[in-house]
C-alpha cells in the first residue's frame, strides 16, 4: 500500500495567489482529515469528511479556505487568496470509520511570501 | 469544548532512563487514545494506542496507561535511546460514539541525551 499521498510536497507562492493542495487517501478508507501544523498553534484539524461528506469544518480559519472531496480517492484544500500567515505544513490523514487510527500523509510545506 | 492537556511541553532524559508524558481529556465520551511520534520534518506516526475497555497496554519499551475515572492517560518509555528523541502527541477521540476526529494535545518535545 502506498499510504496517503499528498502533492505538492513543497509550495512557495506569493501573497494573493490561489493555492491548491491535493490528497489521495489510502484505498478503502472512508474518513479523511486535513490538518495544519505550525510551531505556534501545533496540530490543528481544519476539516474532516466521512464517505466524501464534510462532517466538521469548524477548524477552517476563514472563508479563504475551502475543501472538497469529489470521490473516495481524492480531496483538495484550496486557499484563495493566500496570505503569509497561511505558511505552515498541511497534513492529510485517512482512516477507517470506527477503527480510530489515522494514517498521515507526508505533508505539504506551504510558504506564502 | 473538548480539550486535551499534555505535560510536560519539553522533557530531557539521559539515555537509558525512563520518560513519562501525561495527558488529560475533557470529553467523557472519548474511548480511543492514540499516541503519535513525530520526528523532525516527518509526518506523525502512531506508536501505540489504547481503548477505554483496557487500563494498560505495552509494546516492548513503550506502554500506555488509562485512568477513565480521572480522565488521565500516560505514555511511558523505558530504556530510552537517542532515536526516541522526537515530539510526541497524545489524542482523544470517540469513534464508537460517531466522533472520528482527534483532539490532539499540544505535544511534548523529548530529548534523549547520549
Image (tube, coloured by chain):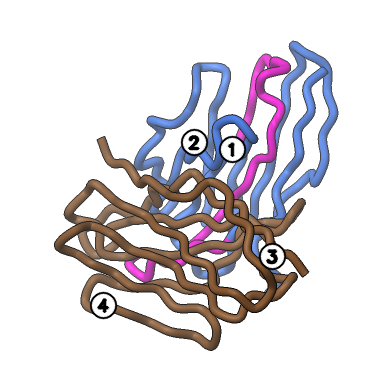
Disc on res. B112: 3
Would you say B108 lies left or right of B41 here?
Answer: left
Residue B67 position in % (x across, y down) = 23, 67
Label 1: few (<14), some (14–19) or many (≥20) C-alpha neighbours in 10 Å:
many
Q: CA distance from mark 1 to mark 3?
A: 27 Å
Q: CA distance from mark 1 to mark 4?
A: 32 Å
Q: CA distance from mark 2 to mark 3?
A: 32 Å
Q: CA distance from mark 3 to mark 4?
A: 27 Å
Magenta-colored span: A77-103
Q: Colour of chain B?
A: brown
Residue at mark 4: B55
Q: Secondary structure at mark 3?
A: strand
Q: Which residue is located at x 35 percent, y 46 percent? A: B4
Which chain hosts label 3?
B
B30, B63: nearer the viewer: B63
Q: Is residue A79 magenta?
A: yes
Q: Secondary structure at mark 1?
A: strand
State whether residue B77 is above or below residue B71: below
Residue at mark 2: A46
Q: Quadrant of residue B36?
A: bottom right
Would you say A111 lies left or right of B9 here?
Answer: right
Q: Is residue A65 magenta?
A: no
Residue at mark 1: A36
Which chain hosts label 4?
B
State whether residue B103 is above or below residue A103: above
Q: Colour of chain A?
A: blue
Amino acid at each position: 500500500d502506498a499510504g496517503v499521498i499528498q502533492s505538492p510536497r513543497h509550495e512557495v507562492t506569493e501573497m494573493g495567489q490561489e493555492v491548491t493542495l491535493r490528497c489521495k487517501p489510502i484505498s478503502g478508507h472512508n474518513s479523511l482529515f486535513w490538518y495544519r501544523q505550525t510551531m505556534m498553534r501545533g496540530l490543528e484539524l481544519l476539516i474532516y469528511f466521512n464517505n466524501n461528506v464534510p462532517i466538521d469544518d469548524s477548524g477552517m480559519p476563514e472563508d479563504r479556505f475551502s475543501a472538497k472531496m469529489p470521490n473516495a480517492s481524492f480531496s483538495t484544500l484550496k486557499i484563495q487568496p493566500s496570505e503569509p500567515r497561511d505558511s505552515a505544513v498541511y497534513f492529510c490523514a485517512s482512516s477507517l470509520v470506527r477503527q480510530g487510527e489515522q494514517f498521515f500523509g507526508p505533508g505539504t510545506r506551504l510558504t506564502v511570501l | 469544548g473538548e480539550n486535551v492537556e499534555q505535560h510536560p511541553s519539553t522533557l530531557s532524559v539521559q539515555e537509558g532512563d525512563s520518560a513519562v508524558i501525561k495527558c488529560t481529556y475533557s470529553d467523557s465520551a472519548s474511548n480511543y487514545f492514540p499516541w503519535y511520534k513525530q520526528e523532525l520534518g516527518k509526518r506523525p506516526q502512531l506508536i501505540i494506542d489504547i481503548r477505554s475497555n483496557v487500563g494498560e497496554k505495552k509494546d516492548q519499551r513503550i506502554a500506555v496507561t488509562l485512568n477513565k475515572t480521572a480522565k488521565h492517560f500516560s505514555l511511558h518509555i523505558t530504556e530510552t535511546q537517542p532515536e526516541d528523541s522526537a515530539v510526541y502527541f497524545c489524542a482523544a477521540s470517540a469513534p464508537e460514539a460517531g466522533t472520528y476526529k482527534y483532539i490532539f494535545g499540544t505535544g511534548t518535545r523529548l530529548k534523549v541525551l547520549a
